[in-house]
């Protein structure tokens, strides 16, 4: 039975990359006197590296190999640049300019009412998650989540499964009791490596990626006035106008029936304490 929904953040809850993180990076570069500029195409390539600090390091090593960091060294420089980026990103998010993607808030509310737990598993810095949830969802939204696992809470970022393992441990649930919602191949790989069945909602940066093995791939979750568009999917979804908690329970039940994993030894949920990371 489906016990928890685990949401990714960037690209899944909202389109935060193109006009959010990317623009904030460019402002940070300008303020630091760097002539670097990440256009939309380059940023799409850089998104293959998850995590902002990791992405900056990759960019410097690949595109600016002769760059000499200031006194203090490259780690400190990346840390400062990343903090500055997040400062600009937070003011953009707090302005309320970023809208939640279709169906996400609806599904969170339905899950809450149905007693399905909610969690977050993201590579993004925790402050960014809280700012987005409060500004684009609901001032109380952070309290809806049993676990918010973000950024450096684990050492290895997606596509490593670590953040999902962390969430499962905090939820005291087995992977097959959960459903992950992701927007990228890195995210799907992370969830799958932790054994969690996954629904993918694509965006313009991720549409072309390989989502083999996902339970379904949709444009978005759908709203009453905006039909969900299914790009690939399993039988229980045929003909649906939107993905609600009942249809996700069906989809998950279908997965349990058709997959060959063992259900013996599932960890029973015995602690609903709120854990914010
Ligand atoms: C996508 C990412 C993040 C963000 C920026 O995260 O790779 O790095 O682009 O966040 P998600 P930070 O797992 O939510 O899809 O700069 O705070 O790292
Ligand atoms: Mg994402």
Image (cartoon, grey):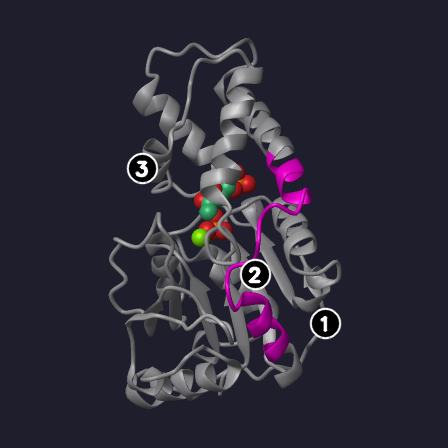
Residue ID at (37%, 86%): 256
Q: Is residue 116 magenta?
A: no
* Residue located farthest toward the front when viewing the structure as drawn: 225
Q: Which residue is mark 2?
A: 120
Point out the stretch of residues depicted in magenta: 89-111
148 in relation to 114, above or below:
above
Query: Circles 2 and 3: CB distance less than 8 Å?
Result: no
Q: Position of residue 184 (x, y in %)?
A: 37, 54
Q: Earlier in the sequence, mark 1 or mark 2?
A: 2
Q: Position of residue 152 (x, y in %)?
A: 55, 44
Residue 175 seen anywhere in this rendered image of the structure? yes
Direction from residue 108 to residue 58 in the image, left or right: left
Quadrant occupied by the C terminus = bottom right
Residue ID at (57%, 84%): 268
Q: Which residue is mark 3?
A: 45
Label 1 Cα neighbours within 10 Å, binned few <14 / some 14-19 / many ≥20: few
Q: Which residue is mark 1?
A: 273
Residue ID at (54%, 20%): 77
Q: Earlier in the sequence, mark 1 or mark 3?
A: 3
Q: Which of the two marks, 2 or 3, is nearer to us in this view?
A: 3
64 in relation to 84, above or below:
above
264 in relation to 12, above or below:
below
């Amino acid at each position: 039975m489906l016990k928890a929904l685990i949401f990714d953040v960037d690209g899944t809850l909202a389109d935060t990359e193109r006009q959010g993180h990317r623009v904030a990076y460019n402002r940070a570069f300008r303020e630091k006197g760097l002539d670097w500029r990440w256009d939309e195409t380059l940023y799409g390539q850089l998104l293959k590296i998850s995590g902002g600090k990791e992405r900056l390091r990759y960019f410097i090593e690949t595109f600016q190999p002769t760059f000499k960091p200031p006194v203090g060294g490259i780690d400190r420089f990346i840390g400062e640049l990343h903090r500055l980026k997040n400062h600009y990103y937070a003011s953009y998010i707090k302005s309320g300019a970023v809208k939640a993607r279709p169906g996400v808030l609806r599904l969170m509310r339905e899950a809450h009412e149905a007693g399905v737990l909610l969690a977050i598993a993201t590579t993004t810095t925790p402050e960014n998650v809280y700012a987005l949830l409060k500004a684009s969802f609901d001032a109380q939204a952070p309290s809806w989540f049993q676990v918010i696992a973000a950024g450096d809470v684990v050492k290895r970022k997606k596509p490593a499964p670590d953040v999902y393992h962390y969430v499962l441990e905090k939820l005291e649930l087995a992977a097959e009791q959960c459903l992950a919602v992701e927007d990228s191949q890195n995210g799907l790989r992370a969830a799958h490596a932790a054994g969690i069945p996954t629904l993918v909602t694509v965006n313009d940066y991720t549409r072309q990626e390989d989502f083999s093995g996902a339970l379904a791939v949709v444009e978005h979750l759908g709203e009453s006035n905006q039909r969900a568009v299914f790009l690939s999917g399993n039988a229980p979804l045929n003909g649906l106008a939107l993905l609600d908690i009942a249809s996700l329970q069906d989809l998950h039940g279908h997965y349990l029936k058709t997959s060959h994993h063992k259900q013996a030894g599932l960890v029973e949920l015995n602690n609903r304490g709120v854990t914010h990371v």
